[in-house]
Image: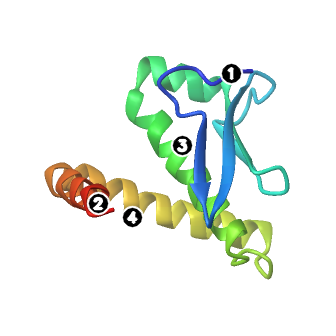
Amino acid sequence: MKPFAPIPETFVINGLTWKIEVDESLDDDYGQCLPNERVIKIGVLGLHALIQRKKEIWATLIHEFMHAILASYGLNYEMSEQEEEKTVRLLEMIVVGFILANPKQCKLILDKLISSK
């Protein structure tokens, strides 16, 4: 299923393109990362959050991006599922908290990074 706009359809980590898909079968999950397929799935709860509370869908994407980053660089291979989830939740809280506390600075940094390519 094609992602619900304005969710991006793809992203790149470590030179590899990943897809973002909406999956109605993920009733209990906001999202899921499938590293072997290079796919992030956003569940129905995630779509509901997009409509009701837009911040949650982006926090979910950041959460799943963290799983994808760990997998892409092999950092999760020796972690248990619980250790990985604990690490990802911590990283998500740090990154989302930082962005929300510093939106102007983050936009400036992002604009400068993009313009320096």
Q: Distance between the residues labelled 3 and 1?
A: 17 Å
Q: Name the residue under label 2.
A: 98
Q: How far apart are marks 2 and 4 (CA)?
A: 6 Å
Which image quadrant: the C terminus? bottom left
Q: Name the residue under label 4.
A: 94
Cβ atoms at labels 2 and 4 below 8 Å apart: yes
Residue lying farthest to the right in this orientation: 36
- Residue 77 in the image: above or below residue 109: below
Please tell me how crowded label 4 is: few (under 14), some (14-19), or many (20+) other residues with Cα within 10 Å: few
**Quadrant in the picture for residue 98:** bottom left
Q: Mark 3 points at which residue?
A: 60
Cβ atoms at labels 2 and 3 below 8 Å apart: no
Q: Which of marks 2 and 3 is nearer the N terminus?
A: 3
Picture coordinates of residue 44 (x, y %)?
Answer: 66, 23
Report the amino acid beneath label 4: Ile
- SS at badge 2: helix
Q: Which of marks 1 and 4 is nearer the N terminus?
A: 1
- SS at badge 1: loop
Q: Mark 1 points at which residue?
A: 2
Which residue lies at the image location 69% right of the left edge and 41% below the top edge? Answer: 19
